[in-house]
Image: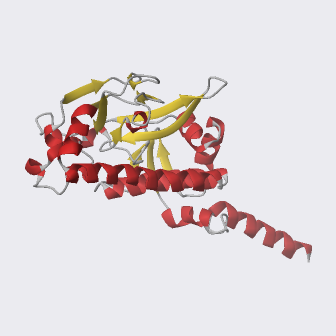
Amino acid sequence: MTSHLYAITASSWPQADAPVSNQALPRSLSGAPGKLADDPFEKIISGRRRIARHASLFVPNERLDLLYAVRFGQFKVFALDPMGQQRVIGFHMAGDLMGLDAIATGRHQFRAVALEDSEVCEIPYADLEAAMSAAPTVQRQFLQLMSQCVVNEGPSATFLSNMRCDQRFGYFLLTLSSRYAALGYSGKSFRLSMSRGDIGSYLGITAESVSRLIARFKRNGWIRVEHRDVEIADREGMQVLFSGDAGARTPHAELQRAASAAATRRSR
């Protein structure tokens, strides 16, 4: 399950001497700032683990011993289809709780791989279960988090399945932008740590389609891209994708209309 979809760059990483619980737990577990000393989840975290880029955090059929709160970095979670191709289920970034896929069966269903050098805080699941049994508030907070995961994932899957390719990509970028803003970072400029192939797998389109969409969005003036750094240049213009008049405000469409009008005048 992927509860959030946003990115944290290296400049946003927590300081090395910052308290583990103060930087790792999702807000729905950690509560309000300044009250972490009373937070029962603070006592459950057993330690940190560094995960190198391209290394796996957990793999299919691995026994559930730990849940993980992403402290910094980014992960992709994927499964293999019957043809052996990766199918990206989602992306996990700072503040996300990972490993929820294993709760139902006691074993992980997916593989989680770091997209960049990352760090997680480890939460022993047995300790979490004990804390939930001893404190109803802990159980309630954890159930609320799982419910929020379902709420966040369900509409995304439904929306994407009914969208055109350009709408899917626009929705993806605008969702990233919103996640950044919700964390207090810029919702206008951010970095894509995932590859175009990973984005395409997540959106159900090819990597080549992602490249074409990036070129189209740049041509329309909606985004600026340098390597993996993206800037939302015209949010309102991109939102036209979802209004039923996707070409109405693009410079390319304006040029087409001007050329058509000129041709009509000449024909008269």
Q: Is residue 42 left or right of residue 73?
A: left
**How many labels sit on residues?**
0
Q: Quadrant of the N terminus?
A: top left
Q: Is residue 184 left or right of residue 17?
A: right
On the image, the x and y values in percent for residue 70 come to 30, 37
Q: Residue placed farthest to the front in the image?
A: 133
Image quarter for residue 23? Answer: top left
On the image, the x and y values in percent for residue 47 come to 18, 29
Q: Would you place residue 37 above or below residue 257 in this image?
A: above
Residue 72 visible from this viewpoint: no
What residue appears at the point 49 percent right and 46 percent down from the top-left corner? Answer: 225
On the image, the x and y values in percent for residue 179 come to 38, 54
Q: Would you place residue 109 above or below residue 7 in this image?
A: above
On the image, the x and y values in percent for residue 261 come to 79, 73
Residue 14 visible from this viewpoint: yes
Image quarter for residue 263? Answer: bottom right
Q: Would you place residue 87 above or below residue 253 in this image?
A: above
Q: Would you place residue 263 above or below residue 131 in this image?
A: below
What residue appears at the point 28 percent right and 56 percent down from the top-left corner? Answer: 184
Q: Residue placed farthest to the left in the image?
A: 37
What residue appears at the point 74 percent right and 64 percent down from the top-left corner? Answer: 256
